[in-house]
Image (spheres, helix red, strand yellow):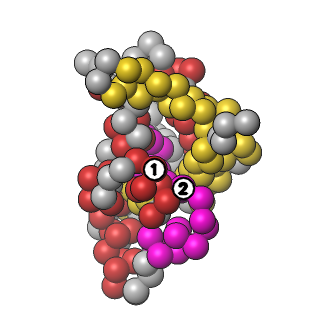
Amino acid sequence: MQIICTFCGRVVRAGRSPEDPVSHGVCTECHDRILAEYGFDTKKFLDQLGSPVLLVDGETRVLAANTPALELMGKRALAVKGTLCGDALACINAAKPKGCGKTDACPDCGFRESVMETFTTGRPVNRRAAVLIRQHGNTITDIPFLVSTKKDGDVVMLRIEPVKAA
């Protein structure tokens, strides 16, 4: 199915063939403009959720992040907006030549798997185990998380819950 932005007419997602039916949605640029014009502050809304949350699209690109997520990543909102989740989270695999979503390890990524499953099926994921692998200098660290996802339109909300050591 082809999805076209209702506001600017740009193709948001191409169909598989010219005969594919057309649906309408909102592209990222129009989405941001509409929210700004009508005064809805996505970050302020997401901050009310308390735990780290990212809003991502069907390619796992970050559309928005709340303050706890930005603190977890050690980054500013402008540094993560439009980046792939693995890049935003500083996953070791995202730094490899093929990049986030394309390495041999990516099919087993709990973050990516949860987002893609929810984006494809519309079904939420609740507290699925996911491990973020980060490298700091010569030290590689596995950081356990529980991830939850929920779809709303063409956006998936990814909640990232750090697992506390017992």
Which residue is painted at 36% across and 25% down in the image? 135
Q: Which residues are magenta?
A: 42-62
Tell me residue 39's x, y (percent).
40, 86
As drawn, 41 above or below 62: below
- Reply above or below: 112 against 147: above
Q: Which residue is mark 2?
A: 52
Q: Amino acid at mark 2?
A: Pro
Q: Is residue 47 magenta?
A: yes
Element marked by disc 1: helix
Residue 72's label in the rendered image is: 1
Considering every residue shown, the one lying at the far front of the view is: 166
Q: Give the image location of residue 121, x and y in percent.
A: 67, 41
- Indicate left or right for 138 with 3 as reference: left
Residue 61 seen: no
- Give the mark toward the camera: 1 or 2: 1
Which picture quadrant has residue 32? Answer: bottom left
Marks 1 and 2: CB-CB under 8 Å? yes
